[in-house]
Image: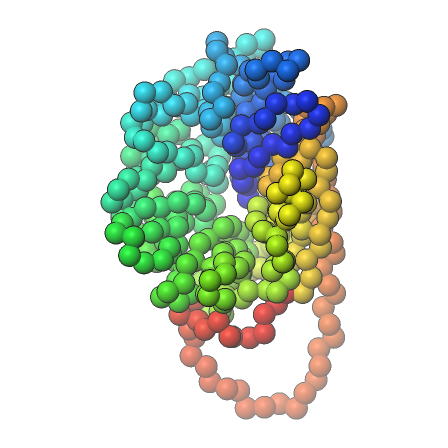
Amino acid sequence: MTALAIEPTTGTRPEPPRTGCVITADGSYAARLAHDGADGAAPSWFPERWTLDGPEPYAVPLPTNQPEEPDTAVLPLSDGRVLVRRRADGRHLFSLLYPTGPGTGEVLLGSVECEELTLLPPAPDGRCAYALAPGEQSTDVWRVAGGAFGPEHVASVPGRCSGGVWLDRTGRLLALDREPADGDGPVKTVAVDLDRDGEVSPLLQITEESEDRLLLADPDSGLILLRSDAATPGELRLGWGVLGSTLPIRFPQALRLADCTLTPFAVQPGQTLLPESCAVALRIDGPAAAEGGAPWFGVWRPAVSHLHQLAAPVGWLAGTGFWSRDGVLALPYVTDDVSCGLARIPAPEPPQPREPVVQAPQAPAVQRPVPLGQAPLGGRPAAG
């Protein structure tokens, strides 16, 4: 699981671009927009690829014939190439960059003409890249890399969409947060089937009036993280649930810190059918971060009623990182002395299962399963 982040400013480094680091779904590569930071002069921006699947991470700069603009977006593919999105005259231009010895090779892919366009998180297959272009009445989904003939229009979703979370390992099902085109109604998350001409189906609706946005989903365990005001009207809180479950969404008190904003950015993979055991990494922004201080991060599991708050490594590309299957969190960082670093932090051990309590047998109660979207907020006691 990945997220876009803001690169921290250290020493005399110039202000970074809006987006910092993007990691492939399998954690093999990352890409960011770096700069030369030459002696207080105007920074010269260039794409940079990080290789993360070896013993030590290393970076390869991918400069082209001219410096990039600070709003150039980058996205790594699993074959080591880096997609770049540039703006020019109302168009969004796409290219693939790759190292060629001392230079940089570039494959021009084409362009999409629209006012607003954002790259979606890296696709699970690592081969394709997608972008979201919201319009007045609908939102277009484009495959901007991995197709046969350059950018391809693959879906048109009614309403104005944002976000973007992949729901499977094949890159077929995409979750989007949708606002009605007329603005009359709260934001709800829908699932878009890219293999069926963008067929749309409801995915997340806790109550009719609540604003429900999906933040992360883990296809292995089914664990989902969301932000909603269903539990406390007027306050957006973090909640969790399980895709396809009949249990209600739960809103742990542990993820409700005063004067802080928590944003999940990575879920431990490989925990098949064990959503409550998954370790979740969250960026924590509080008053200190708002005043220029560094954000910190937390580690939490649904089965544990505690949020472990930890100091981030110096120079952390805040809000980015990935888990290994065995529960080690990797956080990318950059300092004046380390141009490509990866801090590895083991997750706190999950609690040991309690001994079962033997009770006299009772007649089973007959219960009717309730769909996830219709489940009450009470349900069983919240974990965490």
In this view, the residue in front, 350 or 205, is 205
Please determine whether, in this image, residue 23 is positioned above or below residue 36: below
Residue ID at (41%, 35%): 118
Left or right position of 57 against 264? right
In this view, the residue in front, 187 or 292, is 292
Left or right position of 106 against 303? left
Residue ID at (37%, 65%): 209
Please determine whether, in this image, residue 290 is positioned above or below residue 105: below
Query: Could you tell me if residue 324 is visible in this image?
Result: no
Quadrant of the rendering where the C terminus is positioned: bottom right
Residue ID at (62%, 38%): 318
Residue 3 percent across, percent down from the top left: 54, 40
Left or right position of 366 against 353? left
Quadrant of the rendering where the N terminus is positioned: top right
Residue 180 percent across, percent down from the top left: 29, 53
Residue 17 percent across, percent down from the top left: 53, 28
Residue ID at (36%, 20%): 88
Residue at the outermost front position: 291
Please determine whether, in this image, residue 210 is positioned above or below residue 261: below
